Amino acid sequence: MPPTAGYGMTMPVEDGLSAEQFLALYVAAEEAGYHTALCGEVAGAEVLSLMGMAATRTSRIRLGSGILATYTRPAPLAAMGFATLASAAPGRIVAGFGASSPIIVGRWHGLEFNRPYTTTREYLELFARAIAGGKVSYDGEELRCEGFRLQMTPPEPVPVWLGAMGDRMLGLAGTVADGAFLAWCPPGEVAAKRAIVHEAAQAAGRAPDSVELVCSFWGYAGDRPDEARERMRRSVLAYAMVPTHQHCFAGCFPRLGEAAEAWAAGDRRRALGCVDDAVVDAVCAVGEDAVRRRIAEYREVGIDTPILLPTGTVPGDSDGSMQTVLRCAP
């Protein structure tokens, strides 16, 4: 069941921090009262390794992947990883998966970004069978497995979250997952997404409130707010230009089309000029008051678990992240 109060945080994995800097954030988050600490995976820290180290440095906080790409790590291997983590930290592990993007999957890892919905649906099915411990035979449209049997059964079930941006993935989360993980979602857009998750859960014969609704946002409460805002502006643009993510910004980014045109032409400066402060403020929060207000807004619209991503200002800056974690503690 999702926690009934409080909120969580997630590691700023794009900030170029060291393992020790990340672990310091995990420890600080637990001591400050956050109930959940997530870690995504882009091109820096490897998520399961970092979660394993965090499991040995913490004792209470819930640890999860937020979000792990379904294409870059086979489901049986993921089951092995999460079973290992669950053995080290029983009852504290969450497995968060998502389709990722054609940039990460295709360009960086050299894999085919084919049929993301079908691949993700089959991945969740295969992962569930694998981590349950029985002998697995699976012959899907995209994924196959023959004869795998996990030799380390988790002492407690590992909840599965699905990173969901579009309607089909939201529906899939409501149908089969324990949690729906939203990102780049202004509070005013939560209700529609929540309804899709709940309707899918009901159609599958599940209680709608059994699916934990999670939403992450970038926040900063350090000593360099102007620099942080510019960092956020660049990040908002970069994510808005990802084909699989672009629709998430349609409602809060009035000049999205103009930015995409400039981006495609290689004019990054003109594209960045399309991201005004209102766009940044729609999906990010600068300043302690703004961060706390955003958490409250998410709670009011039905998010069970708001997740703060405490960004730094420049690569290697863990001071801003640490200040944000401590100043915005529950």
Image (spheres, helix red, strand yellow):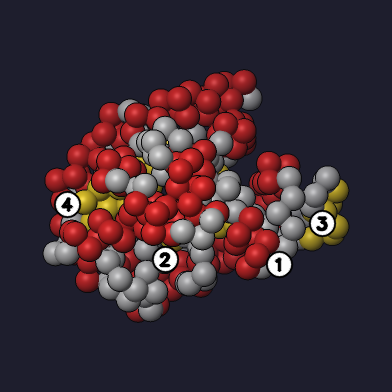
Q: Tag 4: Cα neighbours inside 10 Å, few (<14), some, or many (≥20)?
A: many
Could you say which disc has been placed on residue 203 in the image?
none
Labels 2 and 3: the sequence-earlier one: 2
Q: Amino acid at mark 4?
A: Gly
Q: Amino acid at mark 2?
A: Val
Labels 2 and 4: the sequence-earlier one: 2
Q: Residue at x 82, y 54 (%)?
A: 144
Residue receiving disc 1: 110
Asked whether the beta carbons under mark 2 and mark 3 sit within 8 Å of each other, the answer is: no
Labels 3 and 1: the sequence-earlier one: 1
Asked whether the beta carbons under mark 3 and mark 4 sit within 8 Å of each other, the answer is: no
**Element type at marker 2?**
loop
**Front: mark 3 or 1:** 1
Residue receiving disc 3: 145
Asked whether the beta carbons under mark 2 and mark 4 sit within 8 Å of each other, the answer is: no
**Element type at marker 3?**
strand
- In this view, the residue in front, 258 or 114, is 258
Q: Quadrant of residue 118?
A: top right
Query: Visible in this render: residue 287?
Result: yes
Residue 96 lies, with reference to residue 306, above or below; the image says: below
Spatial CA span between label 2 and label 3: 31 Å
Residue receiving disc 4: 287
- Residue 214: image x %, image y %? 41, 41
Q: Residue at x 28, y 29 (%)?
A: 300
Q: Tag 1: Cα neighbours inside 10 Å, few (<14), some, or many (≥20)?
A: few
Could you say which disc has been placed on residue 13 in the image?
2
**Front: mark 2 or 3:** 2
Query: Visible in this render: residue 95?
Result: no
**Element type at marker 4?**
loop
Residue 275 lies, with reference to residue 310, above or below; the image says: above
- Tell whether 41 sits left or right of 175: left
- In this view, the residue in front, 153 or 180, is 180
